[in-house]
Amino acid sequence: MQISVPRRALVQQLAVIGGLAALLPSRSQSAEPARLDVKDPAAVALGYVENANRVDANKYPSYLKGSNCENCLQLQGTPGNNYRPCSLFQGKLVSVSGWCSGWAAEM
Ligand code: SF4
């Protein structure tokens, strides 16, 4: 048995399916970057911690009480998210409650 589909209808249906597929995010686009591991060498080098209350003030005398990623100039991304991109750690997310020695006051 052979089913006959008009060529024009088939092309229109394929165009619709292709258009819908283009609207869907690809797997790589929807994947969220990994969170920065405090043991990552770059994190260790800058003394990154996930909770600014754990900063060793003796080791980092530049630490200002109350400073954290959320009020740092380097923080990027969407306010309200607990983990956001940081310009010093490309491709990773940092905790908004965190801190590192790269902290700079927001202007
Ligand atoms: S540079 Fe700022 S936002 Fe980035 S990890 Fe350090 S304190 Fe947090």
Image: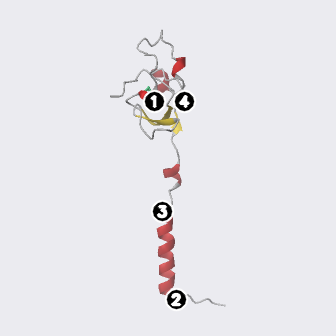
Q: Are marks 4 and 3 in contact (CB under 8 Å)?
A: no
**Residue at the disc numbered 3:** 23
> Which residue shows up at 51% across the image and 38% down it?
81
Q: Is mark 2 on a helix, strand or loop?
A: loop
**Residue at the disc numbered 2:** 6
Classify mark 3 as within 8 Å of ligand 1 or not, answering yes or no. no
Give the number of the disc on residue 70. 1
Q: Which amino acid does label 1 sit on?
A: Glu
Q: Where is residue 60 in the image (x, y as percent from the top left)?
A: 45, 13
Q: Where is residue 26 in the image (x, y as percent from the top left)?
A: 51, 56
Q: Which amino acid does label 2 sit on?
A: Pro
Q: Distance between the residues labelled 1 and 4?
A: 18 Å
Q: Which of marks 4 and 3 is nearer the N terminus?
A: 3
Q: In this view, does 64 lie above or below 19?
A: above
Q: Is residue 48 above or below residue 13?
A: above
* Numbered disc in front, either 1 or 2: 1
**Residue at the disc numbered 4:** 37
Give the number of the disc on residue 78. none
Q: Nearer the viewer, residue 106 or 19?
A: 106
**Few, some or many C-alpha atoms within 10 Å of disc 2 (few <14, some 14-19, many ≥20)?**
few
* Numbered disc in front, either 1 or 3: 1
Q: How far apart are marks 3 and 2 (CA)?
A: 27 Å
**Few, some or many C-alpha atoms within 10 Å of disc 4 (few <14, some 14-19, many ≥20)?**
some
> Which residue shows up at 51% across the image and 82% down it?
10
Q: Which of 40 and 73 is in front in this view?
A: 73
**Few, some or many C-alpha atoms within 10 Å of disc 3 (few <14, some 14-19, many ≥20)?**
few
Q: What residue type is labelled 4?
A: Asp
Position of 79 compared to 73: left or right? right
Q: Position of residue 36 (x, y in %)?
A: 52, 32
* Numbered disc in front, either 3 or 2: 3
